[in-house]
Amino acid sequence: MTGRRVAWWAAAAAGWTFIAWGNRIGLLTGDEASDPWTWVRVGGSLLFGVALAVIAVVLWRGKPLVRWMAGVFVGFGILMLVVWLRSAFSVLGDDESVAFKVVHVVLAAISIGFGLIMARFAVQQHIARKPD
């Protein structure tokens, strides 16, 4: 696993996260601002997006993947699973149009995919560091 490859994936995951959640910042100041789940899904996702962007720059500059970065990758993967599985099931159960449901299932699949890819890099890094 090369640092540049991981950097590329971290940058892609960060970019996707900003696209998926950037337009939802208004939820943090609107009627839903008092709901802790809104802060977890919107605020948490955007914070992980910033962390992934920072990691992408650090790795692109040739620094090694270290433990805290792996922790961010795993945390991002867990957050994407929790947020998007919960959201997908909620949307599928709501009285929304088929198009709305399809869009949200696609968003969920892509976001979960990025989360799993990043978590896999963390696991690979952990395995590579284990002594024989």
Image: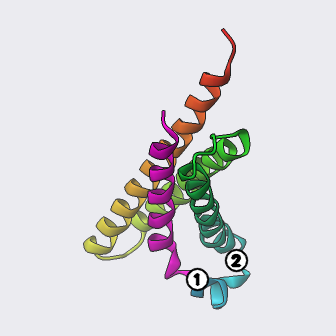
Residue 111 percent location from the top left of the image: 45, 57
> Which one is in front, 31 or 113?
113
Q: Residue at x 66, y 50 (%)?
A: 72
From this view, report whether residue 46 is shown above or below residue 79: below
Decide which of 111, 35 is in the foreground and name it.
Answer: 111
Query: Residue 124 shows which numbered tag?
Result: none
SS assignment at label 2: loop
Q: Is residue 14 left or right of residue 74?
A: left
Residue 67 to residue 19: above or below = above
Residue tagged by mark 1?
A: 25
The extreme left residue here reads 99
Q: Decide: few, some or many residues near mark 2? Use Cα within 10 Å; few <14, some 14-19, many ≥20.
A: few
Residue 114 on image: x %, y %: 45, 51
Residue beneath disc 2: 35
Q: Give, as a single range, the part of the protein colored magenta.
A: 1-25
Measured as percent of width and height from the top left, residue 53 is found at 57, 62
Identity, as a three-letter code, of the amino acid under mark 2: Asp
